[in-house]
Image (tube, rainbow, N blue to C red):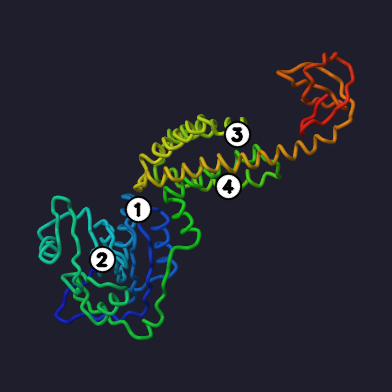
Amino acid sequence: MINIVSSIALLVISVSQLNIFEIDGVFSSAHVRSIERHIEETQYTPNDLLVIQYSSTKYSEKAVSDFEELITDKDFVKAMWVGPYSIEIDYAITSGFDILGYVPGTEIINVPFTTELEDKFCSLHTCDIAEQKITIVDEEGIFNDYLVVGSIGAFLENINNSQSFSNDVKLSIKEDTFEAINFLKPSLMERFYISISEPIFTYMFFVLGFALIGLELFAIGPGIMAFIGGLLVIVSSLPFQEFGINYIGIGIFLVAYLIYLKILSRGYFSVLGVVAFGILVLSSIVMFSDYVINVNKFLLGFISIGLAFFYFVAIPTVIRSRLTTDTSAMTSYVDAEAIFIKQLDGSAVLVSIDENQIRVESDSKIKYTEGKSYKIQENDGNLTI
């Protein structure tokens, strides 16, 4: 917070630079790092104003603690507006700001109620002391140390030329400063890391990566799918340590994955596929049981269904395509001379053609002699002797 010794005269700060930084939660180290990077690059002075626009319910205790420490330590004017949606926000996230604003309907949770906080909020808003929660009413206005407004524009207008709420300071934002407002967000790489930190995307990329690797095992190609799959697995595993993934769940997932590979080798889904799907759903629940962000188990199940459908439809289609290609290539052996080697299961026999051993069908009415030459023929797409 700005520490200013109270005096008889009101201190007026003429804001020379105004930046609005939007973040969608404080649950990842990338959130804190993005704001820290911005502050270091901008080199704020005491006459500058940084407004944080906060618009998400997701947070983690570690990130909130780092965020609070970062904001409190700065000596320029800091403001936060919670909006534009009515969301739930942890009280600790708002600590360290000189000016606070809320959109009507905002719920503040984990409030460490004191007599001062009760006097500040509970006479005007709905307070649930047992649940440590404050619900901001729909009435807009300037209250004791905070504002309730419906837009970021209204928030800036109300703090301009008005006494700020805890320091006996009046902010003056010039018109040219308004015209030069910078609207900022985390960098592309920071947003990417934040996105894959979302448990739904983490799980989706992780299982899809393994699916593509499995697809490459049963498809003809240069290995592009395996490369993409491996990249997805590596990228999706980046947040594992920070967010506390349960590695037992990954072990259960590998069991489901091996069962799916067995299904692919057989070429049909069957009851074993349903069992693999059940194990996959279980693995997703266990994987994210200790995750620092709340996980929607319904969405995890939906992604598991999508992966099962991927195995059920997409991969067998590629396998059938490969078999068709292989059969087309095998037709080049028609009318070739084959040396009988031995009888296999059923009507299948093993023969040798140009030092290549292949499996072909045979006529059950004929008794074949080992080492004898027979002519290869085609019957309903199958090679026979």
Amino acid type for the residue under numbered disc 2: Met
Identify the mark at residue 231; answer none if there is no mark: 4
**Above or below for 231 versus 72:** above
**Mark 1 or mark 3, which is nearer to you?**
3
Which tag, 2 or 4, sits closer to the chain's start?
A: 2
Which of the two residues, 355 or 158, is positioned nearer the viewer here? 355
Q: Are marks 3 and 4 in contact (CB under 8 Å)?
A: no
**Mark 3 or mark 4, which is nearer to you?**
3
- Label 4 neighbourhood size at 10 Å, few (<14), some (14-19), many (20+)? some
Identify the mark at residue 63; answer none if there is no mark: 1
* Rendered residue at 42%/48% (across/down): 199
Which tag, 3 or 4, sits closer to the chain's start?
A: 4
Amino acid type for the residue under numbered disc 1: Ala
Instruction: Give the structural element (helix, strand or loop) at label 1.
Output: helix
* Rendered residue at 29%/69% (across/down): 79
Disc 4 versus disc 1: distance between alpha carbons?
Answer: 27 Å
Question: To which residue does mark 3 refer?
Answer: 264
Question: To which residue does mark 2 refer?
Answer: 1
